[in-house]
């Protein structure tokens, strides 16, 4: 009996020991896969098995956090958020869980929830600047997302696959060829990566035709370019005959470091690549970028001596193929987070991805100005739409233009990481306006607006019920084109025409041109001209009078069929006969001016009315309180106006010179224009006793 009991207890003890051994094996293997070998997908499965077997609550809580870490490192942000949230609920001891949870909420676009998690972390660990940075980022990100910069961003549909496609780089001088990194089917590395869960990455190449269509990507050709390891992170020099790229060696124990290699172009292929010795074989060195003169190579690395995480470093070519020791770009560029995927534009500006600077979630793309030899500063977030809550990285530009490609894991793509293209929106011009009745101020319906451009284009629209019109799009074409000047004519039956001009010459940004046209109705009522002031006791056309007559000149040019009576009036002071004579001379003088400007004299009948057509009677003037008011009333009577006699004028010599285009110019500097058939007012004596009396012409 005792023997049986002993045997039974021994059996139970052995089973318990086996369970502990199995549990310990799962957990140890998971830790190794996560922290040493970077086999995140394998680690997730091992941790879940260990969690089921683990009896101790505190260990279970640690496993939950590690599962979240593995999801985060394998770019599975939604699942990572779920498991970090579980770790916080389970009261994981390290406050880092709140910060990680906030990071994942940022990457999933939940900025309000991320703000709360960052605030909690900042309260728990006030000495860690990441909490304050996170709060700033969460507050700023929503504003950036709601107010994107003026760029067009869309996925490169013909290039992307359902796998990882990222880090594009132009590889020819005309930017019609591009090399990028992909894990799509057909890659050389046939094994499944326990880091990405897919194929190992290779370099692919595609060409763009004249219509902008990209060809089906194919593997970059060349002995030793694409291998069983992971290749990516490419840049091509300015002559487009030398390529630098990254290779990360993978063995059974996981990643064994990354290196930068160079390969010369030989036609459509590349020669066998050579390693650039930068750091030890175990270090991560990759993502090369070249300065415009090809002498500075910037790269990302986790080598010792940095600011934390992966930093940006550079080496300088001291002689052909020989490079200097690496130099860190310093704390203004690098942070305690990761800085990767550099690119240097032709103007020297550095672009890079970072999760350490204030961003919108995950990796964001930043720019830094060139402030010296191999020195950059003034880091600026590129904001939306280049950046998003997802990972945004690996940007490249076409020359110095504000267009190119970048990589992103945001929604809307085809795979996990996709290549997106960006460009400035096309310059668009819109010409819009409002047409109103000059006298009533009411909008005019069905007024015709005609547009004629110097490029030979023409178009017509009518105003709507609200009196507005617009020239914007004409099907797929534009009404308003670049570097073109336009003439507008606005017309409506029983109204005088109005004309206007607009130009897009030297306008380099999209613009809305707005115009207001007030059409004068054609009635029997006389139309008052802008105030015309004559010299005392004279009919000379002064510069001020010429400016006022330009108003009438423009009306006559815009309405070539009008025949008018030009009417001059005086106030009541002075003799009747004299005032009549003086007003006739002034009407004649105004007509003569317009004839000199090219208006056909047959279209104008000058008529002086003297004091016979007062607007304000002497009795009304006498009742005014002040001398100033009385003088203003007399001035209102001393007006020049016109009335429309008919609108059917046909020139006697239609083949002759177009009116408004004569050789005569406006009178300047007080030049006198003598009325035809009358004595020159400068020489004709006018008795002061018969003058307009107290009229004091100003």
Image: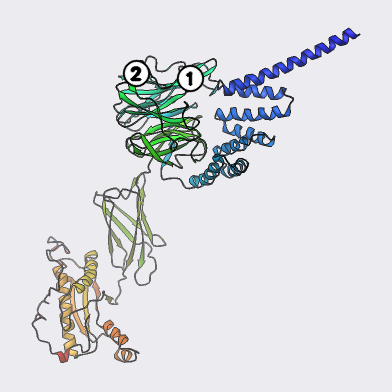
Is residue 48 placed above or below 253 in the rendered structure? below
Q: Quadrant of residue 31?
A: top right
Q: In this orientation, which residue lies closer to the viewer: 605 or 206?
A: 206
Instruction: Point out which mark residue 282 bears.
Output: 1
Secondary structure of the residue carrying numbered label 2: strand
Q: Quadrant of residue 600?
A: bottom left
Is residue 186 placed above or below 466 in the rendered structure? above
The residue at the far top in this view is: 3
The N terminus appears in which quarter of the rendering? Answer: top right
The residue at the far right in this view is: 1
Q: Position of residue 426 (x, y in %)?
A: 36, 44
Q: Is residue 413 left or right of residue 506?
A: right
* Residue holding disc 2: 270
Residue plotted at (57% across, 36% down): 104
* Residue 353 seen in the figure: yes
Q: Is residue 171 left or right of residue 697?
A: right
Q: Position of residue 407 (x, y in %)?
A: 45, 32
């Amino acid at each position: 009996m005792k023997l049986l009991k002993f045997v039974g207890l021994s059996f139970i003890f052995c089973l318990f020991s086996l369970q502990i051994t199995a549990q310990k094996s799962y957990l140890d293997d998971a830790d190794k896969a996560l922290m040493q070998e970077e086999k995140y997908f394998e680690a997730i499965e091992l941790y879940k098995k260990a969690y089921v077997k683990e009896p101790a609550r505190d260990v279970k809580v640690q496993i939950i956090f590690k599962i979240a870490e593995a999801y985060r490192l394998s770019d599975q942000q939604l699942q990572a958020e779920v498991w970090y949230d579980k770790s916080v609920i389970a009261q994981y001891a390290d406050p880092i869980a709140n910060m990680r949870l906030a990071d994942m909420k940022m990457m999933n676009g939940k900025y309000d929830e991320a703000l709360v998690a960052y605030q909690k972390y900042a309260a728990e660990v006030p000495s860690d600047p990441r909490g304050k940075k996170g709060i700033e980022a969460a507050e700023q990100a929503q504003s950036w997302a709601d107010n994107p910069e003026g760029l067009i961003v869309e996925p490169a549909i013909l290039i992307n696959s359902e796998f990882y496609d990222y880090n594009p780089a132009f590889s020819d001088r005309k930017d019609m060829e591009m090399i990028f990194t992909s894990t799509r089917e057909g890659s050389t590395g046939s094994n499944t990566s326990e880091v990405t869960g897919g194929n190992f990455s290779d370099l692919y190449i595609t060409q763009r035709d004249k219509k902008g269509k990209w060809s089906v990507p194919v593997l970059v050709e060349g002995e030793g370019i694409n291998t069983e390891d992971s290749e990516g992170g490419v840049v091509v020099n300015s002559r487009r005959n030398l390529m630098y790229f990254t290779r990360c060696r993978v063995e059974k124990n996981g990643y064994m470091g990354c290196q930068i290699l160079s390969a010369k172009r030989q036609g459509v292929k590349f020669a066998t690549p050579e390693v650039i010795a930068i750091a030890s074989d175990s270090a991560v060195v990759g993502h090369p970028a070249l300065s415009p003169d090809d002498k500075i190579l910037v790269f990302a690395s986790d080598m010792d001596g940095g600011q934390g995480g992966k930093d940006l470093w550079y080496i300088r070519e001291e002689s052909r193929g020989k490079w200097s020791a690496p130099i860190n770009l310093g704390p203004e560029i690098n942070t305690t987070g990761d800085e990767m995927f550099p690119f240097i534009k032709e103007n020297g500006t550095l672009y890079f991805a970072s999760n350490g600077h204030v961003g919108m979630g995950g990796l964001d793309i930043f720019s830094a100005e060139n402030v010296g030899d191999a020195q950059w500063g003034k880091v600026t977030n590129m904001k939306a739409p280049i950046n998003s809550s997802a990972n945004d990285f690996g940007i490249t530009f076409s020359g110095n233009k504000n267009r190119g490609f970048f990589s992103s894991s945001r929604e809307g793509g085809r795979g996990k990481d996709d290549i997106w293209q960006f460009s400035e929106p096309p310059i668009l011009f819109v010409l819009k306006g409002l047409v109103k009745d000059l006298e009533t101020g009411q909008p005019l319906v069905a007024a015709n607006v005609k547009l004629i451009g110097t490029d030979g284009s023409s178009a017509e629209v009518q105003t709507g019920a609200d009196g507005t019109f617009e020239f914007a799009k004409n099907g797929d074409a534009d009404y308003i084109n670049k570097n073109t000047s336009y003439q507008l004519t606005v017309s409506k039956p029983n109204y005088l025409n109005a004309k206007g001009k607009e130009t897009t010459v030297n306008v380099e940004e999209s613009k809305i041109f707005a115009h207001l046209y007030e059409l004068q109705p054609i009635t029997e009522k006389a139309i008052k001209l802008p105030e015309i002031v004559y010299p005392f006791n004279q009919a000379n056309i002064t510069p001020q009078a010429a400016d006022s007559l330009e108003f009438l000149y423009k009306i006559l040019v815009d309405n070539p069929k009008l025949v008018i009576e030009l009417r001059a009036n005086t106030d009541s002071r002075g003799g009747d006969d004299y005032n009549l004579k003086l007003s006739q001379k002034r009407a004649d003088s105004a007509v003569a001016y317009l004839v000199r400007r090219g208006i056909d004299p047959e279209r104008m009948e000058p008529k002086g009315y003297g004091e016979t057509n007062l607007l304000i009677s002497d009795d009304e003037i006498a009742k005014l309180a002040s001398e100033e008011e009385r003088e203003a009333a007399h001035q209102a009577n001393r007006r020049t106006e016109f009335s429309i006699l008919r609108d059917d004028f046909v020139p006697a010599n239609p083949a002759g010179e177009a009116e408004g285009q004569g050789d005569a110019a406006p009178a300047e500097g007080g030049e006198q224009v003598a009325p035809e058939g009358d004595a020159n007012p400068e020489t004709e004596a006018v008795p002061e006793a018969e003058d307009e009396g107290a009229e004091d012409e100003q």
